[in-house]
Image (tube, rainbow, N blue to C red):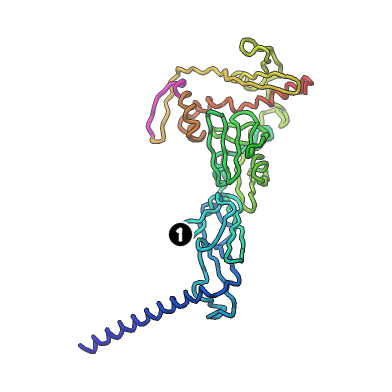
């Protein structure tokens, strides 16, 4: 019995002795490391081309001078690998790359971002690029202009979209870049400077779309349309994403270059409060939108008015996000839309209210400038 007891005690003492030796080794090694000179560093991301939403490890290897190396090259000194958070680091585009509390990097947007690490006087950098795995649906081509979904595309780029109802503008932030897109018209801004859109925003299937050219004009993106796959390929640095583009059906006996207007454009004098203006007639939206214009030298003023015949007292049943059904008049819903447009996306409101919401915002999709310019060109005024 004593022999068994002595054997257990001996094993316990050996274990304690081993732990003490490991502790001493680690303590001495740690103290010694402080006196060693870092000769170089090596950045070691798990990979440099990553899918948006993915998380990767990022280590930094500290390479010491050979004179003070305690072990072989194959097995460097203990503790020469450190996490990114333990270094003096910078991330050029934090809206694309984010360092998590566990030391991993998360790719939050499409694009390329440079990670720079500095240890002493040594500085190294590596570029990590994020790409979107699945294509975004909802793109559209109208009159030669390619449009892409606003909320989904800017979110994929690590940005944000906010609608300011009082100003009638969409405020977009992508990193340090600020873009303002008007709900109607083509006068946008880029970091406070004027930016002219190729076409006004478009509402298609209840989703707000913007001209894809904004991505190249404002964010230096590269755009390539693939006619075979019907996709717009968007490249931001080495990061890529794709948007599926719907092709509008061509009417029978109408060529692709035919302007879809209802007869010849003409103008009549306006009266009442708009006296001195002209009313454009013959455009496709004449029953729902009245287009006023005034020419003063080289300056053309345009004003639109919604004249769609809507029964404001008509009752509409709609379903909220919890699945509950409600009934309101169109007039009541129009008031609600005016308040909610600043808080919720067009996609969400269309999902709940359908065509009622689509009718409310339909005027924003009318390219009044195009039809006025076409009329003035026919008359030889521009």
Give the class, few, some or many, for how many residues have Cα within 10 Å of label 1's Cα (few <14, many ≥20).
few
What residue lies at 57% left-to-right and 20% top-to-bottom? 306
Q: Looking at the image, which is closer to me, 80 or 372?
A: 80
Q: Nearer the viewer, residue 56 or 351?
A: 56
Q: Quadrant of the N terminus?
A: bottom left
Where does the magenta region start and end? 323-333
Q: Quadrant of residue 279?
A: top right
Q: Is residue 29 located in the magenta-colored stretch of the structure?
A: no
Q: Is residue 1 above or below residue 171?
A: below
Residue drawn at the location 64% of the way across and 52% of the way down = 237
**Residue at coordinates 66% horizontally, 46% vertically from top-left?**
221
Kindly identify which residue carries mark 1. 102
Residue at the left extreme, as displayed = 1
Q: Is residue 20 above or below residue 256?
A: below
Residue 116 rendering spot, x and y as whole percentages? 59, 59
In this rendering, position of residue 354 left or right of residue 195: left
* Residue drawn at the location 61% of the way across and 56% of the way down: 114
Image check: 265 left or right of 40? right
């Amino acid at each position: 019995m004593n022999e068994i007891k002595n054997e257990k005690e001996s094993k316990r003492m050996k274990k304690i002795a081993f732990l003490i030796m490991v502790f001493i080794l680690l303590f001495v090694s740690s103290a010694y490391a402080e006196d060693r000179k870092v000769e170089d560093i090596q950045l070691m991301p798990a990979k440099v081309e990553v899918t948006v939403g993915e998380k990767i490890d990022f280590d930094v290897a500290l390479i010491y001078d050979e004179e003070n190396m305690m072990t072989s090259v194959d097995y460097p000194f203990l503790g020469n690998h450190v996490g990114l958070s333990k270094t003096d680091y910078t991330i050029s585009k934090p809206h694309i790359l984010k360092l998590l509390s566990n030391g991993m990097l998360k790719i939050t947007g499409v694009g390329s971002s440079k990670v720079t690490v500095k240890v002493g006087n040594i500085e190294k950098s590596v570029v990590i690029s994020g790409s979107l795995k699945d294509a975004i649906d909802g793109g559209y081509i109208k009159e030669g202009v390619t449009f892409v979904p606003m909320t989904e595309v800017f979110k994929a780029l690590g940005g944000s979209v906010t609608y300011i109802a009082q100003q009638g503008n969409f405020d977009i932030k992508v990193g340090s870049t600020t873009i303002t897109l008007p709900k109607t018209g083509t006068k946008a801004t880029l970091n406070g400077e004027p930016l002219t859109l190729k076409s006004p925003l478009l509402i298609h299937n209840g989703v707000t779309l913007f001209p894809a050219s904004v991505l190249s004009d404002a964010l230096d993106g590269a755009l390539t349309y693939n006619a075979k796959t019907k996709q717009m390929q968007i490249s931001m640095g080495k990061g890529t994403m794709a948007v599926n583009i719907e092709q509008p059906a061509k009417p029978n006996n109408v060529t692709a270059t035919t302007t879809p207007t209802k007869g010849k454009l003409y103008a009549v004098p306006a009266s009442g409060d708009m006296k001195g203006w002209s009313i454009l007639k013959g455009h496709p939206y004449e029953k729902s939108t009245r287009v006023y214009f005034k020419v003063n030298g080289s300056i053309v003023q345009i004003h639109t008015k919604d004249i769609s015949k809507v029964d404001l007292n008509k009752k509409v049943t709609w379903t909220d996000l919890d699945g509950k059904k409600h009934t309101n008049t169109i007039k009541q819903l129009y008031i609600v839309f005016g308040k909610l447009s600043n808080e919720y996306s067009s996609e969400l409101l269309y999902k709940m209210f359908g065509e009622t919401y689509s009718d409310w915002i339909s005027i924003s999709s009318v390219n009044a400038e195009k039809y006025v310019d076409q009329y003035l060109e026919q008359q030889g005024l521009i």
